[in-house]
Amino acid sequence: MSDTPDQLLDNLNALATGLFLLTAFGIVAMRQARGVLNLFILQSLLLAASAALLGFRHHSEHLYGVALVNLISKPIIVPWLLRKTASAEIYTRREVDQVLNIPTALLIALGLAILSCFLGQPLLNAVAPEFRGPNVPMGIAGLLIGAFTLSVRREALPLLIGLLVMENGAFLAGISISRNLPLLVELAIATDGLIIVFISGVLIRAVQKQIGTTAVGELAGLKEVTVEPAEKEETK
Amino acid sequence: MLNHILFNLIQVLVVMAFAPLASGVTTRLKEMIQSKRGPGIFQPYRDLWKLFHKDEIVSEDSSWIFRFTPYIVFVTPIFVTLLIPVLTNYPLFFAFMGDMLGAGFILALGGFFATLAAIDTANPYGPVGASRTRMVGFLAEPVFMIVFFTVSFVAGSTIPYIVQEKWVTPLANFFLPSHVLLVLAFLMLILAEGGRIPVDNPTGHFELAMIDESRFLEYSGRGFALMKWGGQMKFFVLMIVFLNVLLTPWGLAGDQTLSAVLLAIPFVLFKIFCFLLVLVVIESSLSKLRLFRIAEFLGAAFITSVAAMIMQVFLP
């Protein structure tokens, strides 16, 4: 095979991971619950694209399988499940608030991305040269930024999406290290993710129905004084 | 040598002649999307003609800065034109006098004087607009720096004529993540620097909401015409840098002949027309941000440019 198509595929794969990082930043910064969900769908599509490109590059059917599983489970089934279970949380609330202001959160996320480049370096040295793409550092960055989203967001849906971003990051790193990840494992992980989404969706719905909001940050105001749910609805 | 001076002159003339046309085309396209019946695409020329023939009124309390500024605002984009590839892909007479950072600083000089002039008159809206422009300016500055330095890191040079080759040879380099992310960051920067819609509304006439326009409120007659023409040329130059250096360095003259250079003009205008189509779609589908959300918009541009830097510098 000539050199140029491989280079093109490598560059396209690198582009997918770069945009993956950008969507992770977007999920940290986005104000609307709906926007967070859309960015997550975009991120999952980029993950599937990266898996497909790597599969084409290394002639591996397993990676095509990963791409297909990702393409079906995350961009299609996850939003559908969330719409069925927690649509009030996504479609009626416009703005979600954060612990930190947005520029600060973005700068910390940026620091995490740079850190993950250094964390990924020893791992990259351990694998074969043809797998030394940007997938591993960007996957670790996705993992860290997802964890950061979990700590910085105050409401249920962005928290859930933060969890899924962590999973996406782990996938992105995983597909580049080995070309023969058994499909069974992929399917198991994907099903696991869907069940997490389903259970959280039901939980969000229940909490929303009981209390009227899922703003976890307001729990801080509950110290030593009990707030009746009815009162809380009045103040909202 | 004489050839190169002539080509440089042609470049300057192209920028001077077609900058108002680009502005007119943008307005017309926007009107078509909003299904309005507005003025034709040559209206900016008629405006400039009219303003040049009107009397100029200068406030008694203003200093020399107010009178001097229109000339600086008019001349700085022309200086930048000498440094960047407008029509040719080989360096011309002044190409090595300054690099992209130099071009950025020359453009900033015009903005600086426009700000001073706005404060110089005692008009209450001038300083408000001036301070807002400064806010946008200093938030945009780090993005400019990182975009330029990443580009220079890739090309090993800060001269735009050398940079433009690197992204398309081989063609696979066009899809490098650092290239695409830099293009995104620079697009956001153009929207902010040109005072386009997510940051500022160029057609707004409400003084309290103005950012860029309120600096020109006190000008009339010839001074206003020069300021207006200079602003149009600045935006044209930014588009040229974006298209000819970063995004699509094709269609420029490769031969040292007059015909090749003249043939490049329609190509460049076509590229600019395509860019204006995208710009109009962006402007029509977004709404103007609140003032303190601009920091977040430019923060996003900053993050994008730094992501490009990470992809380029830290990864093999």
Image (cartoon, rainbow, N blue to C red):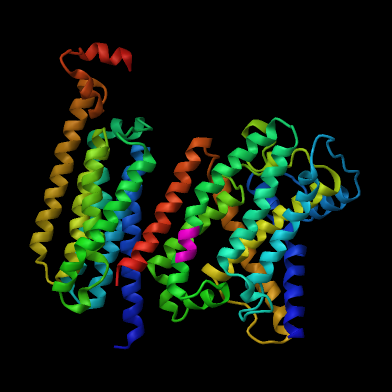
Q: Is residue B279 above or below residue B178?
A: above
Q: Is residue B66 above or below residue A124?
A: above
Which x, y percent locates residue A232? Answer: 26, 15
Q: Is residue B30 above or below residue A55?
A: above
User: From the viewer's perspective, is A145 left or right of B40?
Assistant: left
Which x, y percent locates residue A94? Answer: 38, 32
Q: Is residue B187 visible?
A: yes
User: From the viewer's perspective, is B60 left or right of B22?
Assistant: right
User: From the viewer's perspective, is B123 left or right of A129?
Assistant: right
| Identity of the residue drawn at 67% across and 57% down | B234
Place residue A3 in its image quadrant. Answer: bottom left
* Most common secondary structure along the magenta stretch: helix
Q: In the picture, which quadrant includes the N terminus of chain A?
A: bottom left
Of the pair B24 and B58, the residue shown nearer to us:
B58
Which x, y percent locates residue A101? Answer: 36, 36
| Identity of the residue drawn at 16% across and 47% down | A194
Q: As drawn, which residue projects farthest toward the front?
A: B63
| Count of marks overlaid on the render | 0
Which x, y percent locates residue B240? Answer: 62, 65
| Identity of the residue drawn at 46% across and 76% down | B156
Q: Which residues are magenta?
A: B145-149
| Identity of the residue drawn at 16% across and 77% down | A128
Residue A5 is one of the magenta-drawn residues: no
Q: Is residue A38 visible?
A: no
Q: In the picture, which quadrant includes the C terminus of chain A?
A: top left
